[in-house]
């Protein structure tokens, strides 16, 4: 009887480190950029009070998996899972609970973008937001930047101060900014990780040489970066261009002129597109989240779980031969 491994939410952090995750996600973009992965844009089924999201793809290389991430959003919350198949055997390998997985891969995607697009001497990080995604961004970026200072801002001062204390507990100097403009002042890399519907980063807040990771929204009617801020960018990377044309409100609101500056992050990673032309260039990574990121991380988690005897094996009869 075929067995499927269920990997539970609490096991994810115990099985992988952020360094592992960043390497896997970078692998995913290299495979995507070399034609060894397939990614399909997110699809949504919507009824009153509920949205079902599905991302699907295939990854070759050392991973050799196909699968999907799906999640249902309702007024009760959101539940995420990744379903993972072997391309070699056709078997269903695993079902991985994927809330933390999503935080990890989103942080890792920003780390990969920052590695290839930020100035090499970047040392001051600004973060707008104070939730779990903002924390994952800090955790990931602290591994690819030689940080001297982290500035944080949240509309809740209490939340910002709590986040700053966490950053300080990790050994980094930190400052709580009083507004959006202040958190941008003097930073080399800026992260926006909010649920804001309306843009709040203006062109006047952005200095030459800055790199921005905008991760907060994947809906066409929401944005964190104002159109004038987006249009300052020399290079804009996205995890998937087709998906960005459907979901990236920051770019859509900036108008058709912006798309000549947009490239897949995979092309930047494999060297097809330069991530930065000079130290004075302004660069943006508009993160949306794609299946390839989920699949490489789910495979890494699955392999570790098998090796360490983690997860729960479940008999699965849905096999046709």
Image (tube, rainbow, N blue to C red):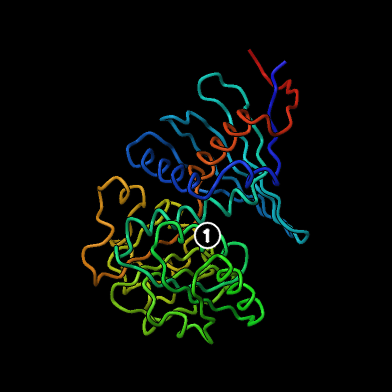
| Number of marks in the rendered image | 1
The answer to whether residue 285 is left or right of residue 290 is: left
Res 202 quadrant in image: bottom left
Residue drawn 51% across and 24% down? 87
260 shown above or below 64:
below
Residue drawn 39% across and 44% down? 29
Residue to which mark 1 is pinned: 139
Residue drawn 58% across and 34% down? 304
Q: Position of residue 206 (x, y in %)?
A: 36, 79
Residue drawn 41% across and 45% down? 26
The answer to whether residue 241 is left or right of residue 58 is: left
Q: Position of residue 294 (x, y in %)?
A: 54, 44
Q: Position of residue 39 (x, y in %)?
A: 46, 41
Other-residue count near label 1 (Cα within 10 Å), few / some / many at <14 / 14–19 / ≥20? some
Secondary element type, mark 1: helix
The answer to whether residue 16 is left or right of residue 204 is: right
**Which image quarter is the C terminus in?**
top right
218 shown above or below 89:
below
């Amino acid at each position: 009887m075929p067995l499927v491994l269920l990997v539970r939410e609490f096991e994810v952090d115990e099985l992988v480190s952020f360094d592992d995750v960043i390497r896997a996600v970078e692998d995913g973009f290299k495979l995507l950029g070399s034609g060894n992965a397939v990614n399909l844009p997110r699809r949504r089924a919507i009824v009153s009070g509920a949205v079902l999201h599905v991302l699907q793809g295939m990854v070759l290389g050392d991973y050799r998996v196909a699968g999907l991430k799906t999640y249902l959003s309702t007024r009760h919350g959101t539940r995420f899972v990744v379903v993972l198949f072997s391309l070699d055997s056709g078997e269903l390998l695993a079902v991985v609970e994927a809330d933390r997985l999503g935080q990890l891969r989103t942080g890792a995607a920003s780390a990969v973008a920052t590695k290839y697009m930020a100035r090499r001497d970047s040392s001051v990080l600004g973060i707008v937001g104070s939730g779990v995604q903002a924390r994952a961004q800090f955790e990931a970026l602290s591994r690819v930047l030689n940080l001297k200072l982290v500035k944080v801002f949240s509309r809740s001062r209490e939340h910002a101060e709590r986040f700053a204390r966490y950053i300080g507990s990790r050994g980094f100097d930190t400052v709580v900014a009083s507004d959006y403009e202040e958190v941008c002042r003097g930073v080399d890399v800026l992260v926006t990780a909010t649920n804001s519907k309306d843009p709040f980063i203006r062109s006047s807040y952005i200095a030459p040489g800055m790199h921005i990771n905008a991760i907060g929204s994947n809906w066409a009617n929401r944005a964190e970066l104002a159109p004038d801020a987006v249009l300052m960018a020399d290079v804009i990377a996205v995890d998937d261009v087709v998906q960005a044309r459907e979901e990236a409100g920051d770019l859509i609101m900036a108008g058709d002129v912006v798309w000549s500056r947009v490239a897949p992050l995979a092309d930047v990673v494999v060297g097809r597109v330069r991530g930065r032309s000079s130290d004075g260039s302004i660069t943006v990574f508009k993160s949306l989240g794609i299946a390839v990121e989920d699949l490489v991380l789910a495979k890494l988690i699955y392999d570790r779980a098998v090796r360490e005897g983690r997860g729960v094996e479940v008999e699965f009869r849905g096999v046709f031969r």
